[in-house]
Amino acid sequence: MENYTAILTLLGIMIILHVISDRVKISSPIFLVLGGVGLGFIPDIPPLSINPEIIFLLFLPPLLYDASFNISFKAFKEHLGTISSLAIGLVFLTTAGIAVFARFLIPGIDWPLAFVLGAILASTDAVAAIGITKGLKLSHTTTTILEGESLINDASALVAYRFAVAAVTGTAFVLWKASLTFLILMAGGFLVGVVMAKTLQFLLRFVRGHTMAVLSFTLLAPFITYLIAEELHCSGVIAVVVLGFGISRLSSLKFPESLRQQSRTIWEIVVFLLNGLIFILIGLELPAVIKSIPASPLLQYSAYAFLITLVAVLIRTLRVFLKKNSLQRAFNHPKFKNTRREIPASVLFTTRESLIISLSGMRGIVSLAVAIGLPHVLEDGTPFPMRSEIIYITTVAVLVSIVGQGLLLPFLIKKLNKSSGDL
């Protein structure tokens, strides 16, 4: 009961902070995160325990469904090459890059633990980036790539995390097994999403004359789809994304405008409340984690978190510009002209867009939930090594990412807009 009261209180505080952030012209994600940190340091405030399973079930399905429902499938498909290179290739590259850096930087961390930390911080959260850049006139290409990346990258990061934790417990890592498992998770999630989309379409046709039933089914569907996929050991993330694409198409073809407007209003409220609560919970976690670590190494671990965040941004920047250049070369190559492999000009992105996409790779609630979800003990009963330290580094990295990149990103966009306007 105490947690329910705390959640309701936080939602009320979040709404007030959101209004204040609009009035003082500070991006709401940054303002809410800092507000959460401030609340967490108030004396006698009881700690709010974050259950990772609840986080995944409560936040991921509706946010993924809403994003996939509203993104243009045509644009998503058109930029799928870039999106997959960031959401799959970059996730594994970032995991490895952070692991190598952590292994040689952080005392006491071995290779399996380094890969656990890398996998935790590998996925990005487009919710923060889009929230911070709202109103800054991002191009359609930039928004599509960022949102499309966020629809898939959690699945890649969770697979990398699963194998990294298994390595800590002594399970040997076999590349072909890991690759096969990844393909099965993705394919299984896709299949579950297709089946659930068809099932929901049938139900909606059956109750099409009852508006409340239609709205209720569409509200429940993401949660049920996620649970079914996870129970079948498939990717719940991919299942919900496929569901969102399927119902979006049905809505545009079959739903009357009045029903689409009602559905849009409901989902706007749900997403607003969940997004706000996410950022407050991120801020609240810092004071709680600090209490679990001796005071002496806190500054040192904070420095590690800052450097790891910098490494992640540099790796992302390198990958984005490599992709930009490869697309440009393929577009200019005469061998691809008038063939199936011809690159359309619409998939290219500019240096300006590349810089914005590079700096928009912020870490968020998924990284935090995964870190908190680390097992307390290994199979032999010994404590999970450096668990508190990994959670602290993750928490600080998430805060540095949202606040630091969040403050720099609008400044960069305004400078780039001004430069392009002067040309």
Image (tube, rainbow, N blue to C red):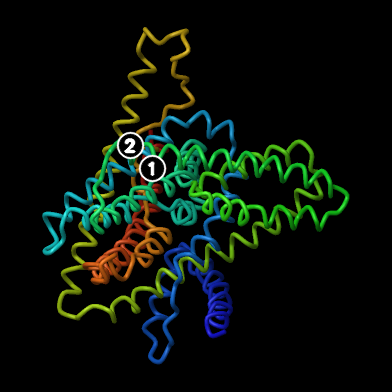
- Residue 224 is situated, as x and y percent measured from the top left of the image, at 63, 55
Is the Cβ of the residue at disc 1 closer than 8 Å to that at disc 2? yes
Q: Amino acid at mark 2?
A: Val
Q: Residue at x 80, y 56 (%)?
A: 213
Q: In the image shown, does 39 or 180 lie closer to the viewer?
A: 180
Q: In the image shown, does 145 or 417 lie closer to the viewer?
A: 145
Q: Which residue is mark 1?
A: 357
320 lies above or below 271 = above
Give SS at disc 2.
helix
- On screen, residue 334 versus residue 107, left or right, reads right
- Which quadrant is home to the C terminus? top left
Q: Residue at x 79, y 39 (%)?
A: 254
Q: Amino acid at mark 1?
A: Ile
C-alpha distance separating marks 1 and 2:
7 Å
- Which quadrant is home to the N terminus? bottom right
- On screen, residue 285 versus residue 380, left or right, reads right
- Residue 414 is situated, as x and y percent measured from the top left of the image, at 40, 48
Give SS at disc 1.
helix
371 lies above or below 350 = below
Mark 1 nearby-residue class (10 Å; few <14, some 14–19, many ≥20): many
Q: In the image shown, does 234 or 116 lie closer to the viewer?
A: 234
- Residue 197: image quadrant is top right
- Residue 135 is situated, as x and y percent measured from the top left of the image, at 52, 52
Q: Residue at x 37, y 54 (%)?
A: 362
- Residue 262: image quadrant is bottom right
- Residue 165 is situated, as x and y percent measured from the top left of the image, at 30, 56
Q: Which residue is mark 2?
A: 320
